[in-house]
Amino acid sequence: MSDDRDEDLQSTLARLRLEHRELDTEISALEAVTPVDQIRLTRLKKQKLKLKDMIAAIEDGDLPDIIA
């Protein structure tokens, strides 16, 4: 059962990382255009940050708790 959960988490992480990279590319392309659509740029950056937070939360959950 744990193996299925690990595979699901790895699959989810891979998907989130891909979306994060795609947003980074889209943001870079949007910033290169003049004039810059600030509203769209802000939304994309917020979405990218949300993905980063989701990735970090999953990764932190994978690490065992270490009690010193």
Image (spheres, grey):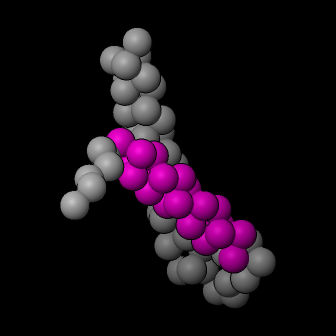
Q: Is residue 15 left or right of residue 30?
A: left
- Magenta-highlighted residues: 42-62
Q: How many numbered callouts?
A: 0
Q: Is residue 53 left or right of residue 11?
A: right
Give the percent coordinates (x, y) of residue 26. 55, 63
The picture quadrant where one finds residue 68 is bottom left
Whether residue 17 appears in this view of the structure is no
Magenta segment includes 58: yes
Examine the rendered structure and indicate whether residue 23 appears above or below residue 43: above
Give the percent coordinates (x, y) of residue 10. 37, 33
Give the percent coordinates (x, y) of residue 27. 55, 70
Task: Identify the residue at the far bottom of this view.
Answer: 35
Please tell me whether the stretch drawn in magenta is mainly helix, strand or loop.
helix
Examine the rendered structure and indicate whether residue 19 appears above or below residue 14: below
Q: Nearer the viewer, residue 60 or 64?
A: 64
Q: Quadrant of the N terminus?
A: top left
Q: Is residue 43 left or right of residue 8?
A: right
Magenta segment includes 56: yes
The residue positioned 56% from the left and 66% from the top of the image is 49
The picture quadrant where one finds residue 48 is bottom right
Task: Identify the residue at the far right of this view.
Answer: 39
The residue positioned 30% from the left and 44% from the top of the image is 64
Whether residue 46 appears in this view of the structure is yes
The residue positioned 38% from the left and 49% from the top of the image is 59
